[in-house]
Amino acid sequence: MKRNLSVMRRVLLVEAEAPFRRSLEKCLSKAGYRTLACASGSDALRLASENPIDLAIVEYHLPDGNGAELARKLKSSHVVARVVLISFYDLDFISCDVLDAVDGFLKKPFDLIDFERMLSRVWEDRVLVAVPRSKLGGADIPASTLKEGTL
């Protein structure tokens, strides 16, 4: 990831799997983001209430709830403007109302290119559902396409 941010943005990373969380935290830090990381929804709510957050990256399956509900709470309380949901689950499992609550979705496993692309799209205010390029031949799928059922 490139360090091309004019303002250091603050990211809340909520991921239960410690090795994956550390890996993403390292990538975000190298890209110039200030990152707060935790493993649970309750910790995420506490951190978000105590710190200004520009973006939350939230795992769907958390030890104390699901990431979609956490995303809704973070956005409805206005402590986080943007939320990206990440998950090993396929899009078939993730309902359209969940996708409506987030600004982006990224299916695990993903590589750094997928991750960087998702971040840049979110900052451009372009809602995106990204499935690893290996499954799509390099193409992104707009969330509206998925919601309309035309995929």
Image: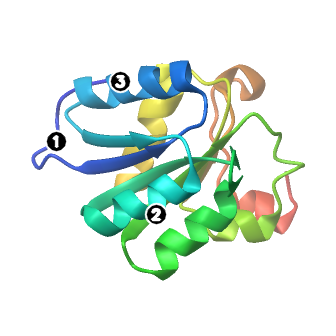
Q: Is residue 81 above or below residue 119?
A: below
| Residue 23 percent coordinates (x, y) | 44, 20
What amino acid is labelled 2 in the image? Leu
Q: Could you classify mark 2 by the number of other residues whose Cα lies within 10 Å: few (under 14), some (14-19), or many (20 or more)?
A: some
**Residue 124: in sight, yes or no?**
no
N-term mark: 1 or 3 = 1
The residue that mark 3 highlights is 27
The residue that mark 1 highlights is 5
What amino acid is labelled 3 in the image? Cys
N-term mark: 1 or 2 = 1
**Residue at horizontal 46 percent and vertical 63 percent from the top:** 45
| Residue 22 percent coordinates (x, y) | 43, 23
Label 2 near label 1: C-beta < 8 Å?
Answer: no
Q: Distance from label 1 to label 3 (Cα)?
A: 14 Å
Q: Nearer the viewer, residue 67 or 114?
A: 67
Q: Could you classify mark 3 by the number of other residues whose Cα lies within 10 Å: few (under 14), some (14-19), or many (20 or more)?
A: some
**Residue at horizontal 43 percent and vertical 49 percent from the top:** 121
Q: Nearer the viewer, mark 1 or mark 3?
A: 3
Q: Nearer the viewer, residue 10 or 116?
A: 10
Classify residue 59 by image quadrant: top right
| Residue 14 percent coordinates (x, y) | 51, 45
| Disc 2, SS | helix
Q: How many marks?
A: 3
**Residue at horizontal 22 percent and vertical 50 percent from the top:** 9
Q: Which mark is residue 45?
A: 2
Classify residue 50 by image quadrant: bottom left
Q: Quadrant of the N terminus?
A: top left
What amino acid is labelled 1 in the image? Leu
Q: Distance from label 3 to label 2 (Cα)?
A: 23 Å
| Disc 1, SS | loop
